[in-house]
Amino acid sequence: GNSVTQMEGPVTLSEEAFLTINCTYTATGYPSLFWYVQYPGEGLQLLLKATKADDKGSNKGFEATYRKETTSFHLEKGSVQVSDSAVYFCALTGGALIFGKGTTLSVSS
Amino acid sequence: EPEVTQTPSHQVTQMGQEVILRCVPISNHLYFYWYRQILGQKVEFLVSFYNNEISEKSEIFDDQFSVERPDGSNFTLKIRSTKLEDSAMYFCASRAGIQAFFGQGTRLTVV
């Protein structure tokens, strides 16, 4: 079945550091890929998405590229801010959304 | 901006009691979902609903769970006899196209 594997957290960074959160997937067919973010005490918000191979999703300085050859969708940001502290979930869909376990990011000033 | 709304935001119930969690999806959406997130753990798929029937469900969604769309706007999740391990955040989601929109969640505490 479909599954998503994310790097274990927590990830702790200083402000303006470079961020990478790894995500790989297993799926039949050609799923769409997503990153969702969950700020403390809130629900899930879509951060970015990509619907086909080589698509790059981007939003709020975050980027991720759909790599079919490596079945990956790594999240990157060039310079993180304290306000980026949250839990980040990689997800895929070929029907229901299937989430990874989530990676907690903590950014300090 | 349209949004998915869930009520209540927090529910405390005694073990063995029935609970109904309510969701109002975005009005023109056709696909509806329930997910749960046990504290500090991953977001787990429970069930998807399309065209007035369950289209997919996970192993978690056993006979204790049921979903209903009683009218044109609400989408409910019922747990018949709650257990301690049902304590979690329950998220409703809906979609029309690729993107799913999530509600703010209902925190269910079973005591």
Image (cartoon, coloured by chain):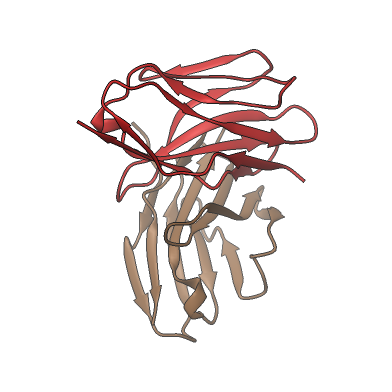
Per the rendering, the colour in which chain B appears is brown
Residue B89 image position (x, y, % from top left): 42, 60
**Relative height, residue A63 to residue A109 (above, below):** above
Identity of the residue drawn at 53% across and 61% down: B70
User: How many numbered marks have been drawn onto this rendered protein structure?
Assistant: 0
Q: In the image, residue A60 lies at what x, y percent? A: 35, 20
Point out residue B26 in the picture as x, y percentages from the top left corner: 45, 40
Q: Residue A32's quadrant in the figure? A: top right
Shade representing chain A = red
Q: Which residue is nearer to you in this view: A27 or A97?
A: A27
Can you say whether A69 is above or below A6 in the image? above
Q: Tell me residue A1's x, y (percent).
A: 77, 46
Residue lying at 68% horizontally and 35% vertically, measured from the top left: A25
Instruction: Give the residue drawn at x 35%, y 60%.
Output: B7
Foreground of the two, B71 or B33? B33
Residue found at x 79% / y 30%: A29
